[in-house]
Amino acid sequence: MAAGSEGNILFVTHGAGRGRIVPTGDVFFSRLKVRDPELAARLQFHQTGTPAPSLNGVALAVFWLGDPLRQKYPDCYADASAIARDAARRGIPVLNHPDGLSNTTKAVQSEIWMKAGLPCAPVACVSTSAELTDAFAGMDGPCFLRGNDTHAEREIRMLCAPKQVRAAAEAICNPVALVRIHDVRAEYRRAGTPASSLYSRFHHKARAFVFQGDVKSSHLFFSHHLAVGLSNSLFAREERPKRRLLRKIGFRKQLFNDMIAEDLRYFRTPAAHRNVLVKAVAALGLDVAAVDYSIRPDGSLILWEANPYFFLPPGEQSVLADERLAVARVNASLDWMANCLWAALPKRLAS
């Protein structure tokens, strides 16, 4: 069915100077124009800070906004909430409701998941020196100190002893999150996993995309660091020119090949614990998010965070793009997202 007087999809984005544009947006929309022009023709866009949009002809509203929305962008939250209320009055479904986009601070997210019986690390939001000292004592073990409303791994501190806690407490000037550390690598070692296993040798983090009831595996990173991210992953290390040269003469080539194979296997295998991942996103009041987690020795998982503001770069710009077949992988993920967007339309319009 061609786009016309009804069946359009409204994407609500930040107006100029009012917040961050979701970085995957341009990549996704560019792919749509080439791969699915019919769906691309249905899209219309509204920026916060401009007069409220007409919802005539809109069949689905998508809030493509930074998070946590209410805490970081209160004016955009107010604008988006008004649109969501108008959509509700008209019976128009929405994806990533503004209230759900406000549930992603580390402490709130953890509280919601724990109440829902989902496996995650406990998190406390602390604002003062005394709160940090008391919260650390209550965690009964090593913790990360990090931003409460950010997704990036930078500026994460590990606190293992009272002396470190006192030093960190002196520097607190904004609310921060204290996250109880779960050392999954240590669990593999205690479980007797062979020392040659990547999971025994390194820390790891898996990512999967969730779009309502569907899940798509994305990538699997390994790192020497407990807080695993792209910047400290072994893939980032292996992409350096010196490492590329060393691999040509055979230095740690087997490790490299093993990591690539495990990452590809993860991407190609249907996501394990699909129901847990879907439930985790839905519990936050969200529909679309990238979920980061680790896989434990018994095959269960522990959730780290759900990120509705995720970055899926063009395949050519991905880490070790050629070796990881990144162009085909990113395109497959974008096409999967397009199919999910079709499925989110009312049934009479999606056929």
Image (cartoon, helix red, strand yellow):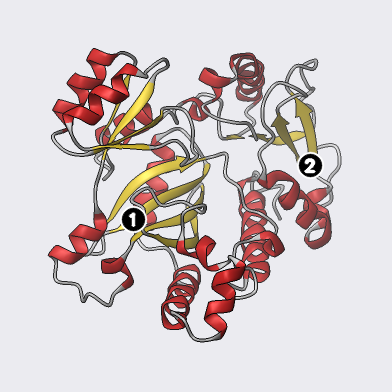
Tell me the residue at 41%/27% (across/down): 148
Asked if 184 appears above or below 53 in the picture, the reply is below
Q: In the image, 251: left or right of 91?
A: left
Please name the amino acid that badge 2 sits on. Answer: Leu
Question: Label 2 belongs to which residue?
Answer: 43
- Residue 225 position in % (x across, y down): 36, 53
Tell me the residue at 69%/51% (across/down): 350
Element at label 1:
strand
Asked if 293 appears above or below 250 in the picture, the reply is above
Asked if 248 appears above or below 233 in the picture, the reply is below
Tell me the residue at 57%/84% (across/down): 248
Asked if 200 appears above or below 310 in the picture, the reply is below
Q: Please tell me which of labels 2 and 1 falls first in the chain.
A: 2
Between 101 and 93, the residue placed more toward the observer is 101
Between 143 and 278, the residue placed more toward the observer is 143
What is the quadrant of residue 254 in the picture?
bottom left
Q: Quadrant of the C terminus?
A: bottom right
Label drawn at residue 294: 1
Residue closest to the far bottom: 249
What is the quadrant of residue 299 in the picture?
bottom left
Q: Residues within 10 Å of mark 1 (few under 14, many from 20)?
A: many
Between 146 and 327, the residue placed more toward the observer is 146
Label 2 and label 1: CA atoms lie apart by 35 Å
Element at label 2:
strand
Number of numbered discs present?
2
Please name the amino acid that badge 1 sits on. Answer: Ser
Q: In the image, 303: left or right of 327?
A: left
Frontmost of labels 2 and 1 is 1
